[in-house]
Every structure is written in C-alpha cells, then in structure tokens.
Image (tube, helix red, strand yellow):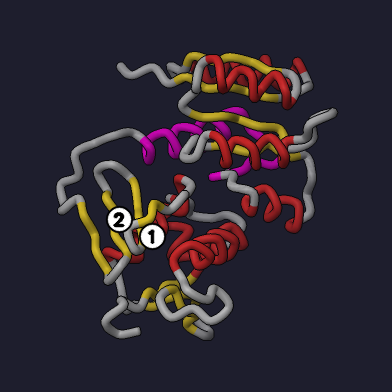
Amino acid sequence: MVTHRVLVVDDDPTVSDVVRRYLEQDGCRVRLAADGLAALAAVDAERPDLVVLDLMLGGLDGLEVCRRLQRDQPGLPVVMLTALGEESDRVLGLEVGADDYVTKPFSPRELTLRVRSVLRRTAPAAPPRPALLRDGDLVADTGRRTAERTGRPLALTVREFDLLEFLLRNPARAWSRADLLDRVWGWQFGDQSTVTVHVRRLREKIEDDPASPVRLVTAWGVGYRYEPAARA
C-alpha cells in the first residue's frame, strides 16, 4: 500500500489533531505545522504529496503560503481550509493555486475524501489511452502529467491539468459547469464557481489573449467548449 505524506497547516491544535487522526486512519503519514513559515520549512525539509492548508493563519497567511508553494513547488497539490463563507474568499483561494477547498466547520470524513480524490489524480499510472494529447502547439503528456505550449512548459495545478486533459479528449462539445464539476472534479454537487475560476486560470496559460479566447470558449447559455486549433 502506498503511504502518502500529507502536511497539515493549521494554528488550531484541535482542528489539526482531528484532521491528523482521520488522515492517518486513511493510511496517510501526517506532519503538522502551526504557521506559514513552519509550513514552508516543512515542505523544503520533506516534500509532502499534498498540503492541507488553513486560509486564516497568523503572520504569513494561507494565501501567501499557497502563492509561494505554487512558485517554488509547482505541481504540489493544496487543499485549502477556510472558515470564511463568502464565495469571493473561496474563489481567491482557488485563484492562487489551491486544487480544492473545504469550508469550516467541515466533516473530517469529507476532507479525507477530498484529499484522497486529489491524491488519486496525481498518482502516477500507465494510462490505457495514448499518453500524448496534441492540439497545434499545445501538448499534454497524461503519463507524466505535464503540458507545454510552443515548446515551453506550462505550470498547471492538479485540477488545471485534469480540466485541460478532459477538454482535449472531448473537444467541440459544450459542457455546463455542473457537467465539468462532475466529470473533472468527481463532485455530484458543489460550488460551480470552482469551475469558473479554473477555466479563467487555464485560459491565462493556453490562450494568446485570455480576454478573447479562441480555444477554451464560452458556450453562451450552457458553459464552455474547447475548440481545437484547426477550427480556431
């Protein structure tokens, strides 16, 4: 059995202990950090497979920690914990690179399932379908989970890569946000603004002009559609 290393960053020892116990029962090796600087040091010392990160930390807050992780450890999955209920705050966590989020108060079991889902998507596996997906100057390697455009690597988060892969495999069809939430995230219900944020971030990386996209376009009244370069 593969044992995943998870770093839990929260300044509330009660929350940290509950999360640790549930993740350990699920087979994870868990390390705790109580603040942002300790979290960054822990990532440098022993790179975890995933970080569970509280948004509201004293000193260096969770948003800045997430920004630095995305800059210095690209591809490291982050599941954000937030006690804030406003949609704008949840969206901000996704904007800086979090792959998923859970709002406090939360079910520890739900958090465990979310962590497992992200880890499953990042686990190396030999894909049954062709590893390379090409569309003009855009190439996604589903085996290595890397992507490049015009020969330059794209810094994609876990969910951004998942979304890109799904769209490359299913072009020229309009998908609603609910469809994408189900097919890409595996959620039967959830905040659909998650999809909106990831579409916007992905456009910034694959479009010449994200404000006027020609690949990942809006299907008015439905959701989004991927137009292959040959059709753009």
**Residue identifier under label 2:** 140
Q: Using the image, tell me which numbered label, if any, was put on residue 164.
A: 1
Q: Secondary structure at mark 2?
A: strand
Part of the protein shown in magenta: 99-122
119 or 209, which lies in front?
Answer: 209
Q: Secondary structure at mark 1?
A: helix
Quarter of the picture holding the N terminus = top left
The residue sitting at 35% across, 65% down in the picture is: 167
Q: CA distance from mark 1 to mark 2?
A: 8 Å
Number of residues whose C-alpha sits closer than 10 Å to that of mark 1, classed few (under 14), some (14–19) or many (20 or more): many
Q: Position of residue 81 (x, y in %)?
A: 68, 36
Does the residue at mark 1 contact the one at mark 2 (Cβ under 8 Å)? yes
Q: Position of residue 212 (x, y in %)?
A: 53, 81
Amino acid at circle 1: Leu
User: Is 44 placed left or right of 150 in the picture?
Assistant: right
The residue sitting at 64% across, 19% down in the picture is: 41
